[in-house]
Image (cartoon, rainbow, N blue to C red):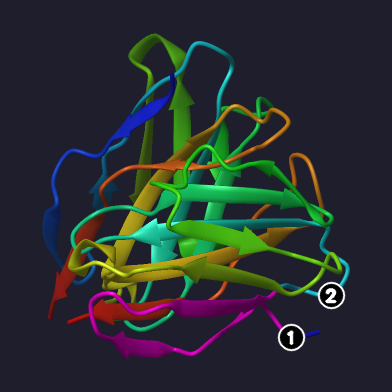
Amino acid sequence: AQSVTQLGSHVSVSEGALVLLRCNYSSSVPPYLFWYVQYPNQGLQLLLKYTSAATLVKGINGFEAEFKKSETSFHLTKPSAHMSDAAEYFCAVSDGGATNKLIFGTGTLLAVQP
Amino acid sequence: GAGVSQTPSNKVTEKGKYVELRCDPISGHTALYWYRQSLGQGPEFLIYFQGTGAADDSGLPNDRFFAVRPEGSVSTLKIQRTERGDSAVYLCASSTGQGGVQFFGPGTRLTVL
């Protein structure tokens, strides 16, 4: 069975500071990993995905994530936070199999302080 | 050109009533997913369609929940005898097929009084 754990339901950073959102996964097969962002009253938007190519994945809006198999982690980072980054972020895992359904973490709400 | 759309955006109903939630996927996407997002939680998988058939309905919580996709495009999620615990945001996603990125709609917020 696959699962995702997101440490920290709320994270607050200052504008311009480093953003680090943590995600650990559990999977019995090589995982496909995703980060989605959800702005208020909007649908989930894909930030980036890992599908067994390069371990450092670059996404939209300056975000990137590194797949570390030894740590079963896929943490999301951004060097410098913008006010517009305030949103909820979800990490998800899929086995890439016939269904390709996503298993989501509980989300991390990012606040950016001026 | 348009993304995934869902109607209605909000639905308020009374306990015991029947509701239908509609999803219009991106044109040409053969795969369609329904998820449910309860307050403070991540989305949870309900059902997956490949074309017209439900290829995986393992996430449906009980037999009050049913979904159809008769022509391989629009899908309807049907909930009978609604309960207060059914209150959640119901999300629809579509993709080009196996392994494709899922694109999500804005969701339908269901409130059961």
Quarter holding residue B90? bottom left
Residue B113, above or below B87:
below
> Do callouts 2 and 1 mark residues in contact (Cβ within 8 Å)?
yes
In this view, the residue in front, A112 or B44, is B44
Does residue A2 belong to the magenta stretch? Answer: no
Residue at 72 percent of width and 72 percent of height: B25
Quarter in which the N terminus of chain A is drawn:
top left
The Cα–Cα distance between marks 2 and 1, rounded to whole angstroms, is 8 Å
Q: Name the residue under label 2.
A: B27
In this view, the residue in front, A113 or A7, is A7
Quarter in which the C terminus of chain A is drawn:
bottom left
Mark 2 or 1, nearer chain start:
1
Q: Give the range drawn in magenta.
A: B2-24
Q: How far across and how far down the image is residue A12, in percent?
A: 11, 62
Residue at 25 percent of width and 48 percent of height: A106
Q: Which of the labelled discs sits on residue B2, or is there none? A: 1
Q: How far across and how far down the image is residue B42, in percent?
A: 32, 52
Locate residue B45 relative to residue B2 in the image: left or right: left
What is the secondary structure assignment of the residue under circle 1?
loop
In this view, the residue in front, A8 or B106, is B106
Q: Which of the labelled discs sits on residue A80, or is there none? A: none
